[in-house]
Image (cartoon, rainbow, N blue to C red):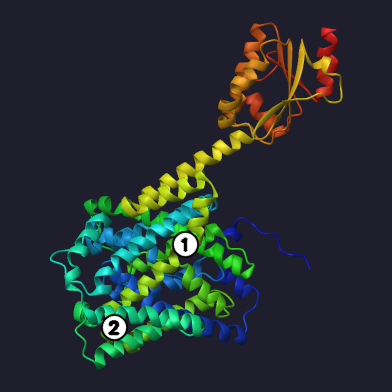
Amino acid sequence: MHRRQETVWDEFTPKLVSRLREGYSTADLRADAIAGLTVAIVALPLSMAIAIASGVGPERGLYTAIVGGFLVSALGGSRFQVGGPAGAFIVLVSACVMATGLEGLILATFLSGFILTAVGALRLGTYIKFIPYPVTVGFTAGIAVIILASQMRDFFGLVLGGPEPAEIVEKVHVLWAARGTVTPAALGLAVATVAIIQGLKRLRPHWPGMLIAIAATALAAWALNLPVETIYSKFGELPRTPPAPALPAMSGDLIVQALPWAVSFALLGAIESLLSAVVADGMTGRRHRSNAELVGQGLANIGSALFGGFCVTGTIARTATNVRAGSRGPVSGMLHAVFLLVVMLVAAPLAGYIPLAALAGVLVVVAWNMAEKEELWSLIRASRADAAIVLVTFGLVVFRDLTEGIIAGAAIGGAVFIRRMSDAVQVEPLDEGRPIAEQTGDVVVYRLRGAFFFGAAATLGSVLDRIAEQPRAFVVDFSDVPFVDSSGARSFEMLAHKMARKGGVLVLTGAVPEVRRVLLAQGLREPHVAWRSSVGDALAEFGAKGA
């Protein structure tokens, strides 16, 4: 049986459609239901904790996980991706809320959905994966530090004299000044939460450690009547149902305020979701569709905003849990959202008993796991270039801005790549088995190796000029050059004119069609330059003329 040839439209086909085309049995549904329930157990406390840490009510986290999570699985390009609110967004979301309010956050989420959909439709998803690995490690470690710092108030039960600063240096100063207000009960619950999660991870790795820790500490706080803040004491009773869909509030001024945040949400969401999809591919041997995934993420963000949620993305923790729980495809992610909705309908009042200190403990564990400590240290030790990239990204993310960190890290990574590629280009004398005397004096032959682009042109331009000072014919073999850009071609065009003024000629041989096309487009044509099919032909003609 012949496999159907993929078309351009297949690139945008949701994986749910592909999975259903393969056939879907009752056994598949049973496996997906178990996986979906497992992920929902993990997602329930995380969604509320991330929402609270982001400066919004816990119900917003549930709206995001239910609506956004359902659409990510139903419309995305990854077979096992599970979406929801992500820890990586905490800093951006909280800053957006402080700058624009809740209405601005929802509008920014709505706009980011259109940006992500456009990026996917324009097939730009492939390029987002080119972000260097040290940038992602530095970025993730920086996010982990910020999340950790953001949870210290609730973790220790501190009482601040005013609002908690967003900037980390000021935040640490204010938290340290309030060290005398530690609430022992809150600290005890937070430490117990961390201990239960880590203990179960070691002793019973398949048990839902986060949910058990939250339930145990909530029960302890209620039974002992501990003086700690809970979800109910801070936010009131959670609603039992999501709100009816409605367009976000819009005005010219609010759109101007929200648009920069929307761009940041889209950039971070694209990186996070594609990284998560790559992790799922590595665990399963499958391949995701980058552009379909971005379109699905965009539509999920639009849907989340319509129901009062905030930015949603694919998350590595929930996606990995989904794979390990035996998921057969996107249906498990959709069912995880359904299970969360059922919990909200049935047990929303019980969530009010959850201590904020316990949720802080959950996020402390999340931050610790996010940090990728071994990868960070290995990159710092690997080379000075990798160390510079990861440390600059980390420093800017922690002390300046997430987007600045990504852009600066990617720029430094690009500069390092250009330098390394330039150093790899070589120009060397070539004898082709002939006496060296045939390549000295009037005729010299050199072979160029590697991609000759603007970086290499700047490095080797003076070398080529010196070689071309004396001979009547300068033969350059391009047979080992896979790529030439306009800057590289321009340097040879200038070299050809220089030799022509001295009565010499530049001879080019062995260029593949794509390289030859670029060179011709930059003016390397007869009579300014001689084209020959091989070095042997060039030596036979120009060597004979000099004889």
362 in relation to 432, above or below = below
- Image coords of residue 532 (percent x, y): 78, 22
Residue 331 in view in this figure: yes
- The residue depicted at 79 percent of the width and 16 percent of the height is 439
Residue assigned mark 2:
354
- Give the left or right position of residue 351, taking residue 266 as reference: left
- The residue depicted at 74 percent of the width and 65 percent of the height is 3
Q: Helix, strand, or loop for circle 1?
A: helix
- The residue depicted at 63 percent of the width and 31 percent of the height is 452
Residue assigned mark 1:
373
Q: Nearer the viewer, residue 460 or 12?
A: 460
- Image coords of residue 470 (percent x, y): 69, 10
Disc 2 to disc 1, C-alpha distance: 30 Å
- The residue depicted at 36 percent of the width and 68 percent of the height is 304
Q: Nearer the viewer, residue 186 or 526?
A: 186
- In the figure, residue 216 lies in which quadrant? bottom left
- Give the left or right position of residue 265, taking residue 385 as reference: left
- Image coords of residue 21 (percent x, y): 63, 73
6 in relation to 421, above or below = below
Mark found first going from the N terminus, 2 or 1: 2
Q: Quadrant of the N terminus?
A: bottom right
Neighbour class for label 2 at 10 Å: few (<14), some, many (≥20)? Answer: many
Q: Which mark is residue 297?
A: none
- In the figure, residue 230 lies in which quadrant? bottom left
Q: Nearer the viewer, mark 2 or mark 1?
A: 1
433 in relation to 353, above or below = above
Residue 210 in view in this figure: no
Q: Amino acid at mark 2?
A: Ile
Neighbour class for label 1 at 10 Å: few (<14), some, many (≥20)? Answer: few
